Amino acid sequence: MWGTIRSVHFVGICGTAMASTAVALKEQGLTVTGSDQNAYPPMSTFLAEHGIEVMSGYAEANLAHRPDLVVIGNAISRGNPEAEYCLEHRLRYCSLPELLREQFLRGKRTIVVAGTHGKTTTTALLAWVFEVNGLKPGFLIGGLPLNFQRGCRFTDSEWFIIEGDEYDTAFFDKRSKFVHYLPECVILNNLEYDHADIFPDLTAIQRSFEQLIRLVPRNGVLLANGDDPNLAPLLNVRFCPVRQFGLGEHNAVRAFNVQLGAGASTFELPSYRFHLNLPGEFNVRNALAVVACAKHYGLSNKQIQAAFDTFLGVRRRMEVRGVADGVTVVDDFGHHPTAIRETLAALRLKYPRQRLWAIFEPRSNTTRRRVFQKELAESFAGADCVVVAQVARLEQLPPEERLNPEQLIADLQARGKTAAYLPDVDAIVSHVVRHAEGGDVVVVFSNGGFGGIHEKLLDRLNRRAAQSRALGLASLERARGRGH
């Protein structure tokens, strides 16, 4: 089947992995088309830069050219006109994980990076370590790593490093995506409850991770965070080697003397001290997973550190989008209470004396629900000012299941926080521009485009600065006039 494919259409092409794979296929000479309901940067820009036009909205007409293969994204459900057209006309279709497995992963030495938090940064950092040391890995990363400027690459190398997502594969395949990835090595960073729309509880997520673990061959390795109590019950396996990493003394790969600086971190292994240009303990743990994996495959401490020295990070992970009128605007993908808490802790290290704003869009399928109502209030402890937007796609959830933003604000105010619930982007931008001062840091938490809030904030702040300058000049002119 795969050798006869010359044209591919992606339904839901603006997903990070979908867009990256689409570009990689185009570069291999295939004709690539795609459609999406919501195209926003950075992926819409990335696709445009590589000559792939996104058809806006879903329609049967988007498949009139009868592509050889249709790749259906995991956000697409029955009732979508393109999915229905595929089924009705018996077009060849598959999920993205299936395409990856059969077209790119089979025969490779695949390293799968999984866990609730840190997958993208860990995958990007590991791929960079392999790249710097001449191994030229293929990779698929759920974000845009700044060192590569792309989230996906296919090479002739025997190595493929892939971010393993536990979310389900497609409407026709409800298994987690990562079970398709033919792992030789699995890295498990951590495990928490998430994806409340498809997993009823933590036990269900643990079962999914157990499926992934059962795929590790006897000549492979399972590398796991030995400090995570939710992973511990999954690690008593005999069919493959297991090595634990972490900060606790029981770990085979243990970091000690951890020091968290303003924009960097250091940690030690026996006889070597690592330096990382990323702040926060979570990033130390991400780096420790990379060290455990790289050393397992024969790389030295110095080879690993050479890559750490030049690692630039990933877009939308504490990414500074700009500074306007003295206010720093930061973009972050955080959409889970733990991720928000740890990001704020890292930003507090980086900006120890600045006032820190957190703007949060409840957009993920978990944070739209009330499952983390209490935990979200606790997660913003590191912020000085908090603004919460309206729950995304409000109409899709019954009232009793929704996160209650007003209650969240009340809980934050009871903790002494300056907090406001402002439903729409324009109201949020006006509020921040009215109250933010030079030196403040504003971090925007969202796993979507959030109505272009970053650009709108920077634009309004720049206009505020221009108005201040104009008023200052006018005042100076008046003073000079009085002087004459």
Image (cartoon, rainbow, N blue to C red):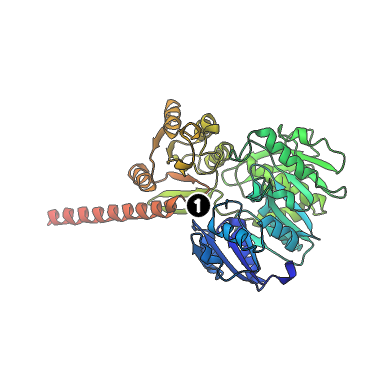
Q: Quadrant of residue 242?
A: top right
Q: Which residue is mark 1?
A: 320
Identify the residue at horizontal 76%, vertical 67% (top origin): 156
What is the number of callouts on the image? 1
- From the viewer's side, name the closer residue of 156 and 272: 156
260 shown above or below 160: above
Q: Quadrant of the N terminus?
A: bottom right
> Which SS class for mark 1?
strand
Image spot of residue 220 (x, y percent): 84, 49
- From the viewer's side, name the closer residue of 267 and 340: 340
Q: Is residue 293 visible?
A: yes
Residue 25 falls left or right of residue 34: right
Image spot of residue 350 (x, y percent): 54, 44
Image spot of residue 334 (x, y percent): 55, 44
Image spot of residue 213 (x, y percent): 78, 43
Q: Quadrant of residue 130?
A: bottom right
204 shown above or below 66: above
125 shown above or below 138: above
Q: Is residue 13 visible?
A: no
